[in-house]
Amino acid sequence: MARPKGSPNKLTADVKDKLQLVMDDVISSLNISTLTTDQKIKILQIGLQYLVPRLKHTSGERDITDYPLFMTDGEPIAINIHSRNEETGEFEVESRPLGK
């Protein structure tokens, strides 16, 4: 019988708990003053992967203009077409009105 959706895997939880106990024991037994600078940096490098959340990659600036969801009568309706200029790398916007 399969476990219910969203419930934690018992084996994984047990392994994580045991691994946490081993890691706590190893870390508490380390004498930081006897480590070289390279060893200290390596410990920080490995430990920070689990402590600091990874950032998502973002590039360039984004259009954060708040556009209306619904158009009211009398407003012209247009489609903005964004294209990138191959030579300059800049984005160009062409506005095309929609006919009724």
Image (cartoon, rainbow, N blue to C red):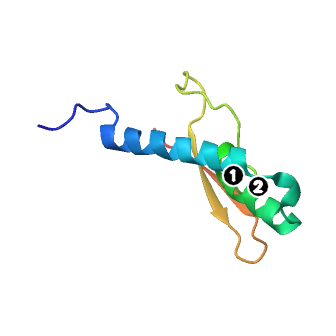
Quarter-of-image position of residue 41: bottom right
Left or right of 34, for residue 72: left
Asked if residue 13 can be seen in this view, the reply is yes
Say whether residue 2 is left or right of residue 40: left
For the N terminus, the image quarter is top left
Q: Amino acid at mark 2?
A: Leu
Number of other residues with Cα within 10 Å of mark 2, as a class: few under 14, some 14 to 19, many 20 or more: few
| Residue 6 placement: quadrant | top left
Q: Give residue 7's position: percent from left, percent from top.
A: 31, 31
CB within 8 Å, label 1 to label 2: yes
Q: Nearer the viewer, residue 20 or 7?
A: 20
Disc 1 designates what residue? Answer: 47
Q: What's the CA distance linking mark 1 and mark 2? A: 5 Å
In the rendered image, residue 51, in percent from the top left (x then y), is placed at 67, 43
Q: Secondary structure at mark 1?
A: helix
Q: For residue 55, say whether it is visible.
A: no
From the image, tell me which residue sits under label 2. 44
Q: Residue furthest bottom?
A: 87
Position above or below: 32 against 76: below
Q: Quadrant of the C terminus?
A: top left
Q: Position of residue 12 (x, y in %)?
A: 37, 44
